Amino acid sequence: MGCIHVSATQVKPVRSRIVIQMAPINRPVETAGAVGGHGTAAADAHRSYERMITSPSSFWMAVREPFMRYDLTREDVRQVVRRGLERTSGSYRLLAELFNLPSADYERFLTFLQEYDCDVNVLPFSSMQRNDRPAIEGAV
């Protein structure tokens, strides 16, 4: 078999006709971003937050996994993080603890939030007076 030589000018017309088709997601608009399609995105973010606070579920299980399955949106993750930062007065270190992460996962947690554009500005939370800061059980 011989080789076929094709010039760039012969390939260009073919290359310009390539069309990428994507199948639409078959979910109703009001449940897009909903865990299992059972509620609104805000309710799912709330459930994910409550799951970490009331049980030993970590951020990786309660938030990251649903996010990676496209069951939570970036905004849902930001909402969970915002809510936690309110409770920790803007401390990401205390947030990692609140979200049941071992101290060894702190850098990984920050990297995940930054990599997926889910980190939240702490300035609105860090302006609280020291005496007004809510206590986290077991925090020093």
Image (cartoon, rainbow, N blue to C red):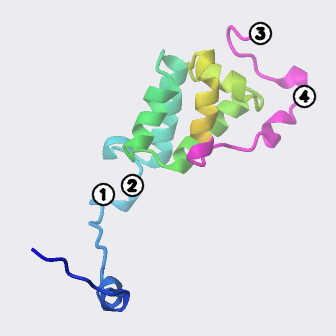
| Extreme residue in the left direction | 1
Which amino acid type is marked by label 4? Gln
Among the two numbered marks 2 and 4 on one chain, the one whose residue lies closer to the N terminus: 2
- 119 magenta-colored: yes
Among the two numbered marks 1 and 3 on one chain, the one whose residue lies closer to the N terminus: 1
Disc number at residue 32?
2
> Where residue 45 sits: x, y (%)?
50, 39
- Tag 3 residue: 140
Labelled pair 2, 4 in contact (Cβ < 8 Å): no
Disc number at residue 27?
1
Question: For the residues marked 1 and 4, what is the alpha-carbon distance in whole angstroms?
Answer: 44 Å
Q: Main secondary structure of the magenta part?
A: loop
Residue 51 sits above or below residue 41 on the image: above
Disc number at residue 86?
none
Which amino acid type is marked by label 1? Arg
> Can residue 47 be seen?
no
| Extreme residue in the front direction | 2
Quarter of image, res 23: bottom left
26 to the left or right of 126:
left
Q: In which quarter of the image is the N terminus?
A: bottom left
